[in-house]
Image (cartoon, rainbow, N blue to C red):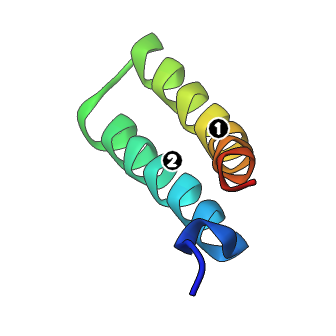
Amino acid sequence: MGSPYENPVVYYGVGLSSAMILAIVAFVLLEGTIRWIVMGLAVVEAVILPQLLKMSAE
């Protein structure tokens, strides 16, 4: 049995779930410019984190 990180659903799920948490925190708790900065971080995390996990599984 291989590592769970060999399954693409795992690393895309981790990236999207953490980005979703950041987005919820941004809209519920933050306002103004900092909200949009955190939303930008959520987008970057949703795009970059799955690629990093994919490289680590190789």
Asked if 46 appears above or below 37 in the picture, the reply is below
Asked if 35 appears above or below 48 in the picture, the reply is above
Local packing at callout 2 (Cα closer than 10 Å; few below 14, some 14-19, many 20+) is many
Quadrant containing the N terminus is bottom right
User: Residue 6, how many percent across, how many down?
Assistant: 67, 70
What amino acid is at disc 2? Ala
What amino acid is at disc 1? Val
User: Residue 48, how many percent across, how many down?
Assistant: 70, 37
Asked if 50 appears above or below 29 in the picture, the reply is below
Residue designated by label 1: 43
Q: In which quadrant of the rendered view does residue 13 lie?
A: bottom right
User: Residue 24, how many percent across, how many down?
Assistant: 37, 49
Q: Nearer the viewer, residue 41 or 10?
A: 10
Which residue is rendered at x = 28% and y = 43% of the image?
Answer: 28
Q: In which quadrant of the rendered view does residue 45 lie?
A: top right
Q: Is residue 33 left or right of residue 58?
A: left
Q: Nearer the viewer, residue 53 or 46?
A: 53
Q: Is residue 51 left or right of residue 56?
A: right
User: Residue 11, how many percent across, how many down?
Assistant: 61, 61
Q: Kindly identify which numbered label has been placed on residue 5.
A: none
Asked if 23 appears above or below 35 in the picture, the reply is below
Residue designated by label 2: 19
Q: Is residue 30 left or right of residue 41?
A: left
Q: Earlier in the sequence, mark 1 or mark 2?
A: 2
Which residue is rendered at x = 57% and y = 53% of the image?
Answer: 15
Quadrant containing the C terminus is bottom right
Which residue is rendered at x = 71% and y = 71% of the image?
Answer: 8
Single out the residue that lies furthest toward the bottom. 1
Q: Nearer the viewer, residue 52 or 43?
A: 52
Local secondary structure at mark 2 = helix
